[in-house]
Amino acid sequence: MRHQLDWTAYETAGQGDAYAGIPASGGDFAKAVAVCINDQLCLRKPKGVMCPSFRVTDDPADSPGGRVKVLKAALNGEFGEQPFADDRLAAAMDLCVGCKGCKRECANQVDMAAIKIEVQAQRNACQGIPRRDRLFAGLPRWLRGRHSRRLLRGLLRWRNRSPWLAKLGERWLGIAARRRLPEPADQPYVSALAPPGEIAGVSGERDVILFVDTFARHFEPEIAAAAHAVLTAAGYRVSTLQAAPDDAEPERALCCGRTYLSLGQVDAARQEARRLQAALRPALAAGTPIVGLEPSCILSLRDDHLKLGLGEEALALSKQVYLFEEFIAREHDRKRLQLDLKPLGRPKTLVHGHCHQKAVGAMKALRKVLRLIPEFEFEFVEASCCGMAGHFGLEAEHAEISLRMAELDLLPALRAAPEAPVLANGFSCREQIRAGCDRAPRHVAVLLRDALMV
Ligand code: SF4
Ligand code: SF4
């Protein structure tokens, strides 16, 4: 088996354990699957995120451990010569939303989100990439130029207002007609350029690089502008990340490759990661912090990129990249933050954490940052994944179960407090909340910008 991701970190996993049950084929990938010790914790619905699909269906086959059993059968040759093309394996992985809940909460940190990427990449290699997956994954490219962006925006606006077109999209492409598709903003976020003759953000102690992801740049540029304003007000010199001078597509915004990776398009994701790495090289060498806004993008840099075989630089980047709230909390702890905030005079805010934020324990940083706002009252919603998970909730066959995941805890909690403002840092989470209970969730950068003393 030629791996699509780098699984060498599992090289010694299960070594010396007679009961490890490592499948006969699959090499280090098989070892990553076999770290499951079958203690069935994932069937007990522990407090936390794991596992949204099992929580909804109550079918053990939809738990991480259930998926491991099918993966082991596939890697032990029970599904024939081409196990990754077998529909039984595809069915086992189908409802995994890649939330990373199991990576944090399972006793042995089974990383089913990464395993699903490998499985999907292997299936793509056998059968080609489905048309809908190309469409969803290619979002950063559809948005690359002014004309293509305008065209996409017009098409999405038309589709969202025409039930006939939405139905056609469902029949041809499998995109759920009942779902509104996110529409790009009138204008994308316009990067602040570095001073002439200077390499962005590498010269001073209070330099920060702001990485504006595809979602913030094109769909909610207000968030990027708010983060820029807050960091500047806090005394940092902020540079927005620009493409490297020798980039082959300098006009196209940089992207972490998340949309490709989540659909098993590993080569395309690697290409995006390399562009980003080249742009960040000076900042990496200088140790300049890199701050980002979208949890799934930033935590991809910290986690998934280490499986792309990108060498030492990927490791260096993983240690130098921060979520916006992590950076603010870190600087506050170091007593370097100069942020004067005023009370917002709002009712108690409900906070929904992105499952990847929860998976890396970043909710502590968010709590710390929210406590910086005087008299600010908030409560974290105890919920699993919101169920949108990027493209997942937009797919015709998954739209209903996606909403059922949100209805488990998140949406009832929000409906129970109709006056409460809502905070959600994930783009997908905000989409799901808007769709499910017609609220207007905000990113913490916008909240802090509103609280600035200016
Ligand atoms: S996936 Fe994790 S929690 Fe589930 S049975 Fe295996 S080891 Fe236990
Ligand atoms: S990544 Fe999330 S959805 Fe997938 S198996 Fe793990 S807990 Fe379940």
Image: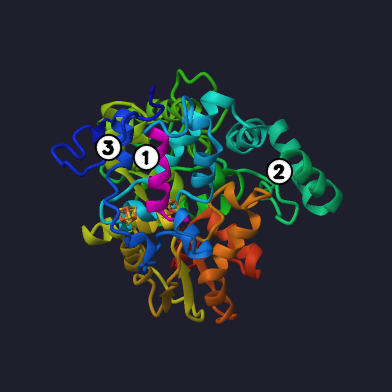
Tag 2, which secondary structure?
Answer: loop
Q: Is residue 432 magenta?
A: no
First in sequence: mark 3 or mark 1?
Answer: 3
Q: Quadrant of ligand 1?
A: bottom left
- Kindly identify the residue that appears in the image at 49 percent across and 60 percent down: 59
Residue position marked by numbered label 1 in the rendering: 72
Q: Position of residue 408 (x, y in %)?
A: 53, 70
The quadrant the N terminus occupies is top left
Tag 1, which secondary structure?
Answer: helix
Q: Is residue 74 magenta?
A: yes
Q: Which residues are magenta?
A: 62-75
- Kindly identify the residue that appears in the image at 56 percent across and 76 percent down: 412
Tag 3, which secondary structure?
Answer: loop
Q: Is residue 340 depicted above or below 75 in this figure?
A: below
Residue position marked by numbered label 3 in the rendering: 22
Q: Quadrant of residue 49?
A: bottom left
Residue position marked by numbered label 2 in the rendering: 174
